[in-house]
Image (spheres, grey):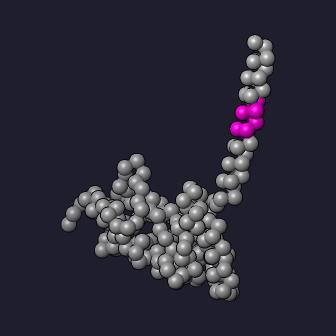
Amino acid sequence: MSSPKRRIESDVMKLLMSDYEVNLVNDNMQEFYVTFHGPKESPYEGGVWKIHVELPDQYPYKSPSIGFQNKIFHPNIDEVSGSVCLDVINQTWSPMFDIFNIFETFLPQLLHYPNASDPLNGDASALYLKSEKTYTEKVKEYVKKYASAEQFQNGHANGNGSDEDEDEDEDLSSVGSLSDEDDDDDIAGTMDGL
């Protein structure tokens, strides 16, 4: 049996060589981000999420920790922290599984078939049980607002959505433009004095 360190390296290399975009944190194979696309024929189709992955020292004997960095509306995913309640990952993890299984099988199945009886997001769970149609509309609204390809490419896949980020950008722009005008006045005043 290979050592956990060797297993981590081989599993991460398998993921790096796949079609997934993987970004290591400080060249550390135990912490990285994976770009994950919502599964086809699900309400999440078209969405792009940045998934944070941490592998414990005891991997593969202990399950990885995964979390969505940009918001997602799902009964088994905490909307604020992005942590995932997934039995296969948390309780029934086996060394036979690897990180690739999480992105190829476990997450797509979770998004296709939410378990509303074991929620981390009570609002999503209640809506799913009350009206699957309304739930699907809410999911698509979240995808558009927090996980669209445009949002992801513009760097807004960091959590709380674009509205706050755009407001911050506008504030920074207005501060910058005020100081530029002041600088122009100072230069003009200096020129007049010469």
Q: In which quarter of the image is the N terminus?
A: bottom left
Count up the numbered dots. Answer: 0
Q: Does the magenta stretch include residue 70?
A: no
Furthest-left residue in view?
1
Q: In this view, does 63 lie above or below 181?
A: below
Which quadrant holds residue 179?
top right
Residue 103 image position (x, y, % from top left): 42, 71
In percent of the image, x 63 and y 81: which residue is there? 136
Q: Is residue 86 left or right of residue 11?
A: right
User: In the image, what residue occupies the spot 40% across and 47% down?
Assistant: 26
Can the viewer see residue 158 in this picture? no
Residue 15: quarter of image: bottom left
- Return the x and y of residue 28 as percentages of the image width and height: 37, 51
| Outermost residue toward the top in this view | 194
Q: Nearer the viewer, residue 131 or 4?
A: 131
- Asked if one can make out residue 84 in the rendered structure from this viewpoint, the answer is yes
The stretch in magenta equals 175-182
**Front residue of 151 and 73:** 151
Classify residue 123 as left or right of residue 54: right
The secondary structure making up most of the magenta span is: helix
Inspect the magenta stretch and tell me whether residue 180 lies in it.
yes
In the drawing, does residue 178 fall left or right of residue 120? right
Residue at the image point whose x is 45% and y is 59% from the top: 33
The residue shown at (75%, 18%) is: 191
User: Which quadrant, please, contains the C terminus?
Assistant: top right
- Foreground pick, 191 / 130: 191
Q: In this view, does 78 lie above or below 192?
A: below
Residue 81, horizontal then vertical, whole percent: 58, 62
